[in-house]
Amino acid sequence: MKGDNTEKEVSMDNVARDLDRLFMAGLGPDHIQWLDLDDKEFTANDGLLDEELKSVNRFHLRQESAGMSEWRNKLHLFEKLSYLGVDGSVNQVFFNEICQIKSLKRLSILRSRISSIKDISNLSNLTHFNLAGAPGVEGFEALRALDHLSVLSLSGNFREMNSLDHVGELSGVESLTLDGTETRTKEYDTLLPIASMTNLKVIMLYNVKSKDLGLSPLADIQSLEYIHIPPIYLRFWKKKDYQLLYESLPNLRTEWVKLAAFDTNFQREYKIT
C-alpha cells in the first residue's frame, strides 16, 4: 500500500512539473500560461502616448482599468503588436477591429459578447488564440483560415456549439484546451473530430464532457504526448478510456494515465469507474 501511495504521489507531483514545462514552451491554455514571452507587457495604466503605441509588442487591456471604447479607437495605432490580451466586455465591433491588427500572433479574449469570429481569418500570422466566456459564438469554422495556428483554447458554455467538427480540421494545432465555465460543464457531442488533429501533442480537458465515445478518439492521435485533466474532473471519463489511451499512445509522457487505468486505489480516490 505504501508503495502504491508513493507511486501516486510521484505521478501527481510530475503533473505540476509537466505543466511548468508546457507553460514555459508557450503551450499553456491562455495568456497567463504563455510563459515563453519575454517582452514587457504594457497596459492602459502605463499611460503611453499615441506615438509610443506604434512600437509596443505586448499589450493587455482590462475593462476595470481602461475605457474600452477609447481603446477600440486606438487599435489602429499598434503597428508592431504581436500579443494582445483583452479582459472585459468585448462586443462584436471591438472584436472585428482587433482582427484588423495584421501583426498579431497571439490573441486572448476573456468575457465577450460576440456571436461571430469570422473576421479572425484576417489574422494570418496568428499562432495562439484563447477565447473564453463567449457564450453567443455560433461557430469556429473561421479558424480554418489560420494556417499558423498552433495553440488553441476554447473555454465557456458555447450555447450554439456542441460540435468540434471545425476544430478537428485544424491539423497544425499542437496544443488544444477545452473547458466549460466555473459553474457549468460544457458537453460536446463527441471528441471524434479531434482524432484528425495529427500534430496534436498536448490536450487539456477541464470542465468538459462528451456525449459519445468518451476519450477513446484520442487513442488515434499517435503524436499525443501530454494529457492534462485536473483531478476533480478525472471522474468524467471511464476507466476503459484511460486503459485504451495508455495502451495506444506510444509517445505519452503523462504518468497518471497508468494509475487511472489500472490502480484501484487511484480510481477509488478520484471516483473513476
Image (tube, helix red, strand yellow):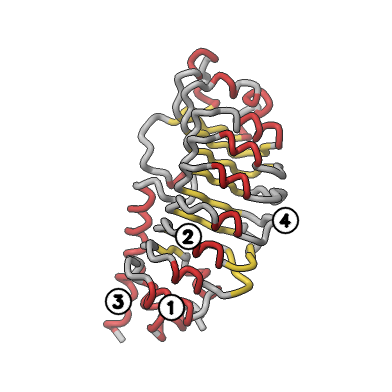
Between 24 and 42, the residue placed more toward the observer is 24
- Mark 3: secondary structure: helix
Q: Mark 2: few, some, or many residues within 10 Å (few <14, many ≥20)?
A: some
Mark 2 belongs to which amino acid?
Answer: Met
Query: Circle 3 is placed at which residue position?
Result: 7
- Mark 4: secondary structure: loop
Residue visible at 63% across and 65% down? 188
Query: Circle 2 is placed at which residue position?
Result: 204
Query: Circle 4 is placed at which residue position?
Result: 160
Rendered location of residue 207, percent (x, y): 57, 63
Mark 3 vs mark 1, foreground winner is 1
Rendered location of residue 201, percent (x, y): 39, 58
Q: Mark 1: few, some, or many residues within 10 Å (few <14, many ≥20)?
A: some
Mark 1 belongs to which amino acid?
Answer: Leu
Q: Mark 3: few, some, or many residues within 10 Å (few <14, many ≥20)?
A: some
Query: Circle 1 is placed at which residue position?
Result: 244
